[in-house]
């Protein structure tokens, strides 16, 4: 499991219970439980909306980057995730 991240929101997947489920109930190792459930995405938001939703979980005041810099970095990174690169 080391190094896995959700291919929708980039949340690190470090525990079995964080993995989503496929339509047949099996574990899906590409997405987290917050983004994907029973074979479908939980929300139909755009990549930009996902970035805005996730900024509060990523941005740390005083770590040297502004919110706008973090947003730009996230947009660049999210384009490499499976959900947004297809």
Image: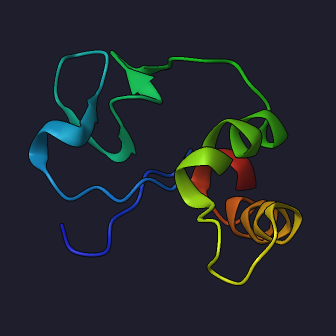
Nearer the observer, 57 or 27: 57
Labels in figure, total: 0
Image coordinates of residue 32 in percent, x first then y, are 36, 39
- Residue for point 40% across, 60% down: 5
2 sits left or right of 81 in the view: left
Q: Residue furthest left?
A: 16
Vertical comparison of 38 with 34: above or below:
above
Name the quadrant of the N terminus.
Answer: bottom left
Q: Is residue 83 visible?
A: yes
Image coordinates of residue 12 in percent, x first then y, are 36, 59
Nearer the observer, 84 or 54: 54
Image coordinates of residue 2 in percent, x first then y, are 21, 74
| Quarter where residue 64 is shown | bottom right
Q: Is residue 86 visible?
A: no
- Residue for point 69% across, 18% down: 44
Q: Residue furthest front?
A: 62
53 sits left or right of 67 in the view: left
72 sits left or right of 65 in the view: right
The colour scheme is: rainbow
- Residue for point 62% across, 80% down: 63
| Quarter where residue 76 is shown | bottom right
Image coordinates of residue 8 in percent, x first then y, are 56, 45
14 sits left or right of 39 in the view: left
| Quarter where residue 38 is shown | top left
Vertical comparison of 71 with 15: above or below:
below
């Amino acid at each position: 499991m080391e190094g896995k991240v959700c291919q929708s929101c980039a949340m690190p997947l470090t525990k079995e219970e964080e993995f989503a489920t496929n339509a047949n109930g099996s574990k899906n190792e590409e997405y987290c439980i917050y983004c994907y459930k029973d074979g479908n995405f939980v929300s139909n938001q755009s990549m930009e909306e996902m970035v805005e939703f996730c900024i509060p979980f990523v941005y740390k005041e005083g770590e040297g980057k502004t919110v706008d810099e973090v947003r730009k970095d996230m947009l660049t990174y999210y384009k490499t995730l499976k959900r947004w690169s297809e």
